[in-house]
Image (spheres, rainbow, N blue to C red):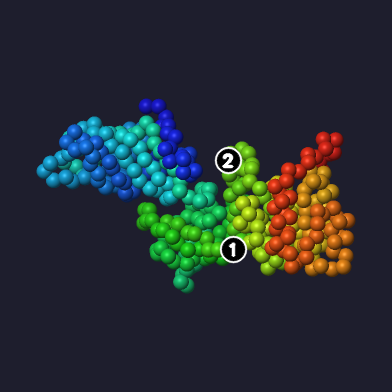
């Protein structure tokens, strides 16, 4: 049998993301499935079953349904199997095999399908990984493993029982080296796999600085996987003051652009290289380097000569002049942080920048 092909889903019109995996990646022992069968004795037979095993390319083993004295199914009976696995709806068309020879057993076989449909109902792309994780809840501290992560949540496997609805705090390190601490989350669903608890956690709101780190890691991972960067508009805020940084990131978060924050000049320079930001906002009263110095250093690299940079902060008498001399696009007082500055950044980000002159060497 040739390789399993993923059929173009009929649900594509819903503008949902189609998962790119093999069918075996969605199968799970104990997974409940719904079977719709067409029989010569009945136009449509529906029953619930569960997956008990599979042999890739040959068959899938299900619990055998009980129909009493009259069996409406038969050898070769065409059926459709549907199930939901971790936010992904799956369906495939197949047929019963060895139906009579297995009549005295508690299971039945269906043929391995030639095509299948799989579509994700998740709002965020997930990145699979395996990283040690500490889970804290109700005074309990448990060790676990981070299985996957997205901008909105993650999957954690642990030996400790966690109930759905529990509020937990997570500590872990991403493969990029970024340390995440005290990430407040809510357990939305729980599965038991081989005596271990797999908790689906949703990150609680109002944690923009931490989630910014996670989104940065996810974008890097997805860009490496696809071999190309995403075309999403990205904005960068360089601000050592957590309060004003959080305030500005919140105001930008609903704009349709991805917003990232950096708490120092060095961190800002590093993120600028990775993100390919469309516009940057820098606090003039930055604690490590003045904001106008940061703007001047960025503009010194000819690759960023046309990058819109906005300074903001306390409206001192020389603030506007310092911004102008540093090559910044404009200066905005703290009072205009979530109004005029946001509008200016979004307008600049959506305006195509003129190309860098080819005769200008790019300073690295």
The quadrant in which the N terminus is found is top left
Q: Is residue 274 left or right of residue 45?
A: right
| Residue at horizontal 70 percent and vertical 62 percent from the top | 339
Residue situated furthest left in the rendering: 69
| Residue at horizontal 19 percent and vertical 33 percent from the top | 40
Query: What secondary structure is found at the residue carrying circle 1?
Result: loop
Dot label at residue 277:
none
For label 1, the residue is 207
| Residue at horizontal 42 percent and vertical 34 percent from the top | 7
- Total numbered badges shown on the rendered structure: 2
Q: Vertical placement of 207 versus 38: above or below?
A: below
- Residue 91 x %, y %: 36, 40
| Residue at horizontal 21 percent and vertical 45 percent from the top | 65
Q: Between label 2 and label 1, give the one nearer the viewer.
A: 1
- Residue 317 x %, y %: 87, 68
Residue situated furthest top in the rendering: 1
Crowd around label 1: few <14 · some 14–19 · many ≥20 (10 Å) = few
The quadrant in which the C terminus is found is top right
| Front in this rendered view, residue 25 or 194 | 25
Query: What secondary structure is found at the residue carrying circle 2?
Result: helix
Q: Kindly tell me whether residue 242 is visible in this rendering.
A: no
| Front in this rendered view, residue 347 or 270 | 347
Dot label at residue 225:
2
């Amino acid at each position: 049998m040739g390789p399993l092909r993923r059929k173009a889903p009929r649900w594509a019109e819903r503008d949902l993301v189609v998962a790119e995996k093999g069918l075996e990646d969605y199968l799970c022992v104990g997974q409940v499935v719904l079977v719709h069968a067409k029989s010569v004795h009945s136009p449509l037979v529906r029953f619930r079953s569960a997956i008990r095993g599979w042999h890739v390319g040959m068959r899938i083993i299900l619990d055998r349904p009980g129909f009493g004295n009259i069996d409406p199914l038969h050898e070769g009976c065409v059926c459709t199997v549907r199930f939901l696995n971790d936010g992904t709806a799956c369906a495939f068309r197949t047929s019963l095999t060895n139906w009579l020879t297995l009549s005295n057993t508690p299971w039945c076989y269906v043929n391995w399908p030639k095509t299948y449909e799989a579509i994700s109902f998740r709002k965020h792309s997930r990145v699979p990984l395996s990283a040690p994780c500490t889970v804290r809840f109700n005074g309990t501290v448990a060790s676990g493993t981070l299985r996957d992560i997205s901008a909105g949540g993650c999957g954690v496997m642990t030996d400790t029982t966690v109930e759905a609805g529990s509020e937990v705090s997570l500590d872990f390190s991403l493969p990029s080296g970024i340390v995440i601490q005290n990430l407040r989350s809510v357990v939305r669903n729980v599965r038991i796999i081989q005596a271990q608890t797999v908790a689906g956690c949703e990150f609680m709101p109002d944690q923009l600085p931490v989630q910014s780190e996670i989104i940065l890691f996810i974008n890097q991972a997805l860009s490496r996987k696809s071999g190309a960067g995403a075309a999403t508009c990205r904005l960068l805020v360089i601000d050592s003051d957590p309060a004003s940084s959080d305030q500005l990131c919140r105001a930008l978060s609903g704009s349709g652009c991805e917003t990232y924050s950096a708490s120092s000049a060095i961190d800002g320079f590093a993120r600028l290289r990775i993100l390919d930001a469309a516009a940057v906002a820098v606090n003039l009263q930055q604690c490590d380097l003045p904001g106008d110095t940061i703007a001047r250093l960025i503009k010194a690299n000819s690759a960023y000569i046309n990058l819109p940079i906005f300074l903001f902060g306390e409206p001192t008498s020389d603030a506007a002049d310092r911004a102008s001399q540093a090559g910044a696009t404009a200066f905005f007082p703290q009072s205009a942080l979530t109004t005029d500055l946001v509008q200016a950044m979004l307008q600049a980000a959506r305006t195509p920048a003129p190309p860098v002159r080819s005769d200008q060497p790019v300073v690295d």
